[in-house]
Amino acid sequence: VQLVESGGGLVQAGGSLRLSCSASGLVYSAYYMGWFRQAPGKEREFVAGISRSERVTNYADSVKSRFTISRDNAKNTVYLQMSSLKSEDTAVYYCAASLVPQPHTDYSMYRYWGQGTQVTVSS
């Protein structure tokens, strides 16, 4: 199983980025997909999640109305559109796959992880 993130980079505060995560080696449509992030010296935190059917999404309060998660089951890809970025959004962003279908924020519920992509927001 491989999850490969892309799309990270350096952006000014107020800007936008779109992260992608391509999955292989698994029945992608069977997995709930999530995005997490980890800033230096901080614990990994949940950012957003999306159900297998794409109908149900879940967000951390800190990113609601700024970030949008989506997925394309035909392309085995999950996306995170990030807008109005703030310096506190700076972190390594990880996508993850879980067989637990209900929305959940606990990283221990996710079975597979990508290697992460760095997002740096300059103020």
Image: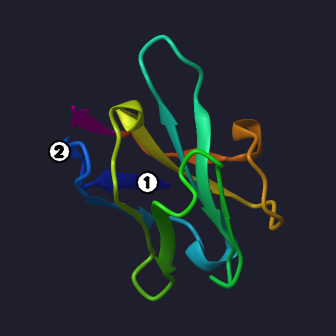
Please give the label number shown on residue 93: none
> In this rendering, is residue 115 above or below 101?
above
Q: Position of residue 67 (x, y in %)?
A: 46, 61
Work out which residue is located at the far bottom of the displayed protein and give it. 74
Amino acid at circle 1: Gln
The correct choice, above or below, for 10 with respect to 64 in the image is: above
Q: How crowded is mark 1: few (under 14 residues within 10 Å), some or many (20 or more)?
A: some
Q: Is residue 118 magenta?
A: yes
**Residue at horizontal 43 percent and vertical 54 percent from the top:** 3
**Which of pointers 1 and 2 lies earlier in the amino acid sequence?**
1
Which portion, as a residue range, is magenta?
A: 117-123
Nearer to me, 14 or 52: 14
In front here: 112 or 35? 35
Q: Is the magenta stretch mostly helix, strand or loop?
A: strand
* Residue at screen point 57% across, 73% down: 28
Circles 1, 2 touching at the beta carbon (< 8 Å): no
| Residue 48, image x, y percentages | 59, 56
Specify the color scheme.
rainbow
The circle on residue 11 is 2
Q: Which of marks 1 and 2 is in front?
A: 2
Q: Is residue 47 magenta?
A: no
Q: Distance between the residues labelled 1 and 2?
A: 27 Å
Q: Mark 1 points at which residue?
A: 2
Left or right: where 63 falls relative to 4: right
Quadrant containing the C terminus in the rendered view: top left
Q: What element carries label 1?
A: strand
Residue closer to the observer: 11 or 41? 11
- Hey, what amino acid is under mark 2? Val
- At x 74%, y 36%, the residue is 108
| Residue ID at (35%, 33%) | 90
Occupied quadrant, residue 97: bottom right
